[in-house]
Amino acid sequence: MRAITRLYPLHHQPDEQPAEPKRIGETVFDSSLHPADSAQLTALHRLGKHSGAPSWRARLSALWRRLCA
């Protein structure tokens, strides 16, 4: 069984209320995926994450720690 996170928009039309309250990141369990497909999906997800350069906030924080040490 694989957990899939469904993301809903935060907005709706002002003249109509949503039928049921939607939560951000609602988890839906999908048992239709074969275990091999699930493993491949997990591997592709890991490959998609890139380790980019640290943000300016992280760099500034590291500089501040070096200066204060």
Image: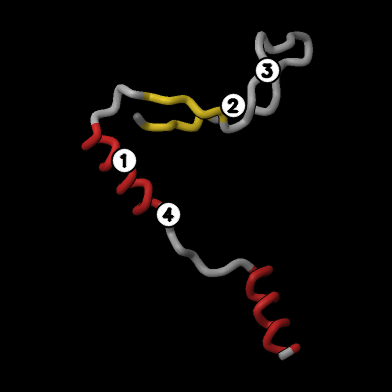
User: How many residues crowd around disc 3 within 10 Å: few (fewer than 14), some, or many (20 or more)?
Assistant: few
Residue situated in front as seen by the camera: 38 or 62:
38
4 or 3: tag closer to the N-terminus: 3
Residue mark closest to the camera, 3 vs 2: 3
| Horizontal arrangement in the rendering, residue 27 relative to residue 65 (left or right) | left
Give whichever of discs 3 and 1 has the lower sequence position. 3
Q: Disc 3 residue type?
A: Pro
Estimate the spatial distance between the alpha carbons at disc 4 and disc 3, rounded to whole Å.
Answer: 31 Å
Give the labeled residue for mark 1: 41
Mark 1 or mark 4, earlier in chain: 1
Among the two numbered marks 1 and 2 on one chain, the one whose residue lies closer to the N terminus: 2
In the figure, 63 relative to 51: above or below? Answer: below
Which residue type carries mark 1? Leu
**Which corner quadrant of the image does residue 37 belong to?**
top left
Cα distance in 3D space between marks 3 and 2: 10 Å
Please say if the residues under marks 3 and 2 sit with CB atoms less than 8 Å apart.
no
- In percent of width and height, residue 52 lies at 49, 65
* The N terminus: image quadrant: top left
Q: Residue under label 4, please give it.
A: 49
Q: Position of residue 54 (x, y in %)?
A: 56, 69
Residue found at x 43% / y 59%: 50
Q: CA distance from mark 1 to mark 4?
A: 13 Å
Cα–Cα gap, marks 1 and 2: 22 Å
Image quadrant where one finds the C terminus: bottom right
